[in-house]
Amino acid sequence: CDDTNNSTLVNCRNRNLKIIPSIKSQNVRKLDLSCNHLEHIANYSLSGIPNLLSLNLSWNCAPGRVRDEGETCELTIERNALTGLCYLENLTLAGNSLTVVPWLPPSLKLLDLEMNNIVMLGFHNISGLVNLRQLYLGMNCFYRNPCNSSFTFLKDMFKDAKSLRTLSLKFNNLTSVPLGLPPNLLHLDISENQIAEVKHSDFDNLTKLEYLDLQWNCQRCDHASQPCFPCANNSALQIHPDAFNHLQNLRVLILKGNSLHKINDSLFVPLTNLRSLDVSDNFLAYDIANGTFFSKLSKVTSLRLNYNFVPGVVFTKLRLSPAFAHMRSLRYLYLDGYLFGQLDKEGIKPLLMLPDLQMITFRTNLIDQVNLTLFANVSSLKFIDLSRNILTLAELCERTQCYTETSPLSLSHEITFSEYYPHWRYSTGGRDTLQHHAYYFNFPSCRNYSRSLDLSFNNIKEIESEFFKGLDDIQCLNLSCNFINQRLNGSQFLHLKSLKLLDLANNRIDSSHNHSFTEIPHLEILYLNYNEFQFMIDDFFHSFDFIENLNSLKFLSLSFNTIGIRISTELRSNSLKVLVFRYNRLDIMWKGGTYTYLNLFTNLHQLEVLDISLNKLQTVPYTVIDNLPKCLKKLYIAFNEITFFHWKNISSLVSLTTLDLSHNFLTFLPKEPVYCGSNFTFLSLKSNNIHTLN
């Protein structure tokens, strides 16, 4: 096990342990024994750490269908194994195939019993837990962990649970809202059950409830991402009009995936403090166009309407209900998967009057026509997402001979708002994924900019300056994953004078013109990764001279381009701070006996971070190390084939703080001490072939 923070935190996670190690310390406050193979917890097993506050015993014996095929296991907990931990506040017992709740100390504030085989609970199970605030009981009875019945509560179970604030009962085959829920609950999750009806009195005593999750109880099966269990006759979840009458404090309501065709206005009248509503994955397409319930959502700031399409129907254009105009507090609107062809001003007129609208998404809608200046006058809008459609912008480019016969790109899953720009999740061809820890630099995204437009995953084949006329305030533009096959000459982004981040990954961009991107005076971040097509053409010389002309450029990604020969012998810049050069062919460029590219990075005078991982390197020539910029702070050479490294030359990098040589083939370290400079703090040699240390 590992101990940190003066031995207050002990980590024994994933160590193939079968018994709990003997630990005797008054200082240990947190112990993690998760993901092992513990078989027995005796009364004395934890007696040496009496001051424990947090204990994680999860995933030591997963339930039958969840565990590996052929694996057998059993975890037993003796009666007084946990009761002696008088100060214990957090206990995680998820994923242990328990059939009964063990005896527990009354000090508990959080108890996690998810993914076990517990199917019945009563007052005696939690009667002594007077301080319990969070209780997680989900996934004890569902398709991956079947119990051939429904999770059952005895009526008196929660009668003394006055401190309980969070209760999760998701994935338990519940057929109705449980009776006798504690009145002080703030957070209730009864999602992914088989509740077909919400009665008028189900939530009457939950007057303090702030969060209610009812999603996927009467499931819509033509858009389900997992095994689907619809209600009888594919009917919608029946919600009594007065079911929410006593939920005046409710702030978050999730009704996603319940086959709803229409929503009654009266349902939301009592919800005077509602801030977030999710009704995605229903059948509300016609309500979105004509419904009036939006007028009752005057305080809602986040509204999710994703995937309410009518099966087999693609609307000519989007038309929103006039009632949207009453949502004066709305900030975030998600309208993916409605399926329509044209996005115009008339169809979304109610949105254009909302004073606080900050983000809107129209992903996966089969949109082929849009005027990009549509939202130009909505000054509050920060992020417009038109990705994953079939836009060509052809209506603006007849003279450029853009093609209009296109088909949509297929999608494997929906990307959420927090996952802008996923293209840097690099694949490494079967080797371990290139993931670094907290010391690794972050890839910039549009979240840091005040006005962003996402046109990724469309069918754009060529860029013309007229496309972006009137968008002079856009600071971040994502054009990744299109079909752009074009030589950029410094005129394409002429109208984007405020642009700071440009993403052109996964295209066929030719940037060998000296004036490429020079029309963008404030460009700071440029993604050109996955544009290998131009570098695969035999006998074609590719110039990177344009980099020197971008005086504001700070971050450049040229990864996954298989760059190997016939390029500029030197990259030059007086502003660039980060260069990501993964998955190219530096092994060819720095091959023994060749000198053409030894100064490739020398004249990047402000460079602080250089990543040359995944370049098939067997070594890095000492001349290259000596000639790297003296201001370099972080050097990543991971996932190569390095068998020998010139350690002595590292001393020439006087500013270096981080060196990553992980996932290589090093077998030994130098016998003599290596001076890495006074600023050096981190060296990674993970996953090499080093067997001995001097």
Image (spheres, grey):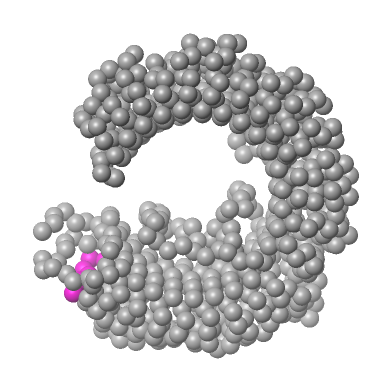
Tell how many labels.
0
Query: Can residue 562 be seen?
Result: no
Quarter of the image with the C terminus is bottom left
Q: Residue at x 75, y 65 (%)?
A: 379
User: Would you identify the image quadrant in which residue 648 lies?
Assistant: bottom left
Residue 349 appearing in the image: yes
Along the viewing direction, whichever of 398 and 625 lies nearer the viewer: 625
In front: 431, or 438?
438
Say which quadrant the N terminus sits in: top left
Dominant SS in magenta: loop
Residue 643 lies in the magenta-colored region: yes
Q: Residue at x 45, y 15 (%)?
A: 128
Tell me what residue is drawn at x 40 percent, y 83 percent.
605
Locate residue 542 relative to residue 9 in the image: left or right: right
The residue lying toward the viewer, choosing from 203 and 544, is: 203
622 lies left or right of 141: left
Instruction: Residue at 70% x, 42% y: name it.
Output: 276
Compared with residue 97, is residue 467 higher up or lower down, i.e. above or below? below
Q: Which residues are magenta?
A: 641-648
Residue 145 in magenta?
no
Q: Quadrant of residue 619?
A: bottom left
Looking at the image, residue 51 lies above or below residue 633: above
The image quarter containing residue 204 is: top right
The image shows residue 367 at horizontal and vertical percentages of 77, 59
